[in-house]
Amino acid sequence: MSLLRPIKSFVEGIDVLMIPMEDLYNIADNLQQSLSEVMIMALQEGIWPESLVRNYSTISAEQQISIIKSRVVIVGLGGLGGYLASLSARAGIGNLVLVDGDAFDFSNLNRQVFCTSATIGENKASVAAKQCSLINPAINAVVWETDFSIENGMKILASSDLVMDGLDQISTRKTLLSISSSMNIPLIHGAVRGWSGQVSIFLPESRIDFDHIYPENSSRSPVPSVLSSAVAIIASIQIQEAIRLLCGYPLPNMNKLIFFDGEAISFHKVNLSSGI
C-alpha cells in the first residue's frame, strides 16, 4: 500500500515496522475508509499501528487482525465489565457490544473503573463506550442501555464471536449462558466477592453449565463486599482467555473453574466435568 510510510521501532530486542497513528488518521481520511480498515491494511503488510506495536511478538500480525475484526459482547459494565471493556479496547478488539441498564452511583467508586465523580447518574454502558473510544478511536461500540433478558438476548448477541460475563446475578448469568450456547457463541465467566474471585470458559460444545458452579438453591447477597484489586485481577484473567480464544490458541482451562484466593494470593483449578 503506497500511502504507508512505516518507521522502525524496537520491541523485545527486534526491529519492527511501525506506522504513527497520525499517519493512519490521514490515510483513513484520504481513502475515506474507517481507521480499523486502514489498521488492518497496515498489518497485512507487516506494519504495526503505533497504538498496537507493543503487542508485537506476543501475538502475530494475523492474530492482531483477528482481534480487530472480532465482535465481543460485554454484559454488565460495572466492576468486572468496566475493566473488561477497557482492556478489550487496549488489546485492539474492534467491535464491542456493551450491555447495562444501570447508572453509576457513589457506591460504585471503590471498584468500577469508569465510575468517577463526573459520571455519577450516567448509564454505565454509555460511559464505557465513550471511554473505550478515547482509548481506541478505531473501535466500533454498540450500546444497549438495558438489562440482558430472554426477550432481548438473541438480538444483543447476534453476529458476535464471544460473550464476556460482567454480571452479578446468578439467574441472569444462566440466561446469558443458555442463549449464547444456543447461538454457538463462547462465554467467559467471571465473578468476584471480597478478596477472591473465579473464571471459567464455556464453549458451545461443552456440556458444562452454571449448575456445575452454583447449586440450584444458591443465592448471592444483593450488596456483596468487593475489593477493586480482586475485580481487576479476575477481569484480567478473563481478557487473557478472551485474547487466546480470539487468536486461536489452545484453551487448557476449558471445563475448569479457576479460583483466585486473594488472601493467600494463590490459584486453584477445579475440573468441572468431575464436579466441585
Image: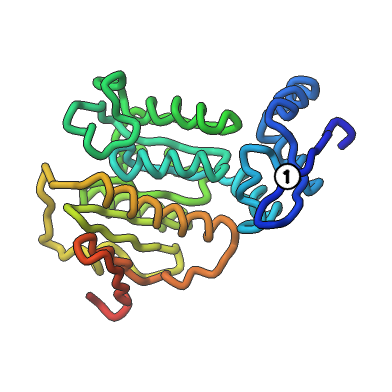
Q: Residue at x 83, y 34 (%)?
A: 5
Residue 65 vs residue 265, the one in the foreground: 265
| Residue found at the far front of this picture | 13
| Element at label 1 | strand
User: In the image, residue 90 lies at what x, y percent?
Assistant: 52, 41
The answer to whether 230 appears left or right of 203 in the picture is: left
Residue at position x 74%, y 20% in the image: 29
Residue neighbourhood size for the residue with mark 1, other residues' Cα within 10 Å, grouped as few (<14), some (14–19), many (≥20): some
Residue 94 versus residue 233 in the image, above or below: above
In the rendered image, which quarter contains the C terminus?
A: bottom left
Three-letter code for the amino acid on which mark 1 is drawn: Ser
In the figure, is residue 72 to the left or right of 56? left
- Report the colour scheme: rainbow
Q: Is residue 155 visible?
A: no
Q: Nearer the viewer, residue 177 or 256?
A: 256
Give the percent coordinates (x, y) of residue 49: 69, 39
- Residue placed furthest toward the bottom: 274
Question: Residue 50 at x, y = what percent?
Answer: 67, 38
- Left or right: residue 7 versus residue 95 is right
Q: Give the residue at x 71% y 44%.
A: 48
Please indicate whether residue 222 sits to the left or right of residue 237 in the image: left
Above or below for 175 versus 42? below
* Pointer 1 residue: 9
Q: How many marks?
A: 1
Residue 102 appears in the figure: yes
Give the position of the N terminus as an image quadrant: top right
**Measured along the vertical axis of the image, is residue 187 above or below residue 152?**
below
Q: Quadrant of residue 215?
A: bottom left
